[in-house]
Image (spheres, grey):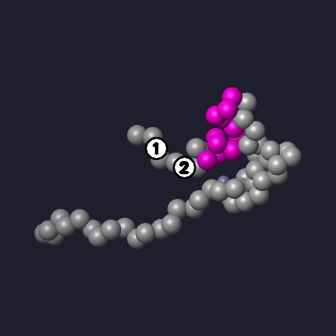
């Protein structure tokens, strides 16, 4: 029988980061490093398409 030793740390993989690649000030439009494009304009001071994109890609916070 194997001793049930937990495997060593999983290989470290840098998570892909979604960051602003380009920002068009006039249109308030963001281009993400992943190619996503959307508005960073906020209607309520908190939410925007850009933030939703970040939240959607942050991933896995659900349990
Ligand atoms: Zn992205």
- Residue tagged by mark 1? 61
Question: What x and y, as percent, mark residue 41?
Answer: 75, 39
Q: Residues within 10 Å of mark 2 (few under 14, many from 20)?
A: few
21 in relation to 57, above or below: below
- State how far apart marks 1 and 2 are (Cα): 8 Å
Res 34 → quadrant: bottom right
Q: Label 1's element?
A: loop
Q: What label does residue 50 carry, if any? A: none
Question: What x and y, as percent, mark residue 2?
Answer: 16, 70
Quadrant of image for the N terminus: bottom left
Towards the viewer: 46 or 5 = 46
Region of the chain picked out in magenta, as a range: 44-54
Residue drawn where x is 43% and y is 69% of the image: 12
Magenta includes 45? yes
Whether residue 31 sits left or right of residue 8 in the image: it is right
Towards the viewer: 5 or 49 = 49
- Residue tagged by mark 2? 58
Disc 1 to disc 2: CB gap under 8 Å: yes
Towards the viewer: 15 or 26 = 26
Whether residue 42 sits left or right of residue 26 in the image: it is left
């Amino acid at each position: 029988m194997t001793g049930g030793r937990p495997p060593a740390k999983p290989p470290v993989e840098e998570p892909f980061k979604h960051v602003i690649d380009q920002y068009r000030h006039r249109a308030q439009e963001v281009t993400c490093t992943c190619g996503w494009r959307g508005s960073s304009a906020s209607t309520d001071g908190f939410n925007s398409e850009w933030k939703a994109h970040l939240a959607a890609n942050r991933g896995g916070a659900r349990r």
